[in-house]
């Protein structure tokens, strides 16, 4: 199964639309968003995807974000989310505190840890755990990026928007 990974969209509607269009073209239905949507109005552009998200440090109006997620039948899980897909256990955390990000990866409790916050695309193996940061969708400091994870091979592919 292919899972779309996205973070730090920061209200950048043109790049959000590009990311969603790319996910649809690739047949990716399940998407994890590691937070920092910023304004709730941007959630509408994810409609039709099986979106699972968490809050980032720049998400102010959490009540309205929850409402907008509900409107598109998506799921926002608070500050942290864990799930299992294709025998892989996932943790989704924004990455605000690097110590927590590191601890999640080093814990051995997860096969995959997905974070954002730094706006730098990266993936590394931390023992048996694959730690992935898809980069930022807004692309203000660097190229706008998303990532795709293949749950069968645990291969990560980055896509510049």
Image: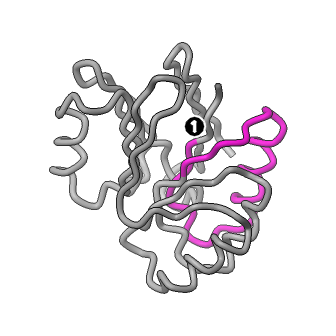
| Residue 33, quarter of picture | bottom right
Q: Which residues are magenta?
A: 5-32
Residue ID at (70%, 64%): 73
Look at the picture and state if 93 lies above or below 76.
above
For the point 53% across and 25% down, the residue is 156
Q: Is residue 114 above or below residue 138?
A: above
Q: Position of residue 112 (x, y in %)?
A: 39, 32
10 Å crowding of disc 1: few (<14), some (14-19), many (20+): many
Q: Residue furthest top?
A: 153
Taking the image as shown, residue 14 lies to the left or right of residue 68, namely right
- Location of mark 1 (residue): 147
Rendered-image quadrant of the N terminus: top right
**Residue occupying the point 17% across, 42% down:** 103
Q: Residue at 56% across / 49% down in the picture?
A: 6
Is residue 47 depicted above or below 100 in this figure? below
| Quadrant of res 30 | top right
């Amino acid at each position: 199964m292919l899972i779309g990974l996205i973070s730090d969209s920061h209200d950048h509607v043109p790049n959000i639309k590009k990311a969603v269009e790319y996910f649809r073209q690739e047949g990716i239905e399940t998407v994890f968003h590691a937070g920092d949507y910023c304004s709730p109005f941007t959630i509408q552009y994810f409609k039709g995807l099986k979106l699972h998200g968490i809050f980032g440090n720049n998400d102010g109006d959490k009540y309205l974000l929850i409402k907008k997620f509900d409107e598109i039948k998506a799921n926002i899980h608070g500050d942290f989310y864990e799930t299992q897909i294709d025998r892989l256990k996932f943790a989704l955390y924004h990455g605000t505190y690097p110590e927590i990000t590191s601890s999640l990866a080093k814990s051995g409790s997860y096969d995959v840890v997905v974070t954002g916050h730094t706006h730098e695309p990266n993936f590394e193996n931390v023992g048996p755990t694959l730690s992935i940061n898809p980069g930022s969708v807004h692309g203000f400091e660097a190229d706008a990026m998303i990532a795709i994870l293949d749950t069968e091979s645990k291969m990560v592919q980055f896509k510049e928007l």
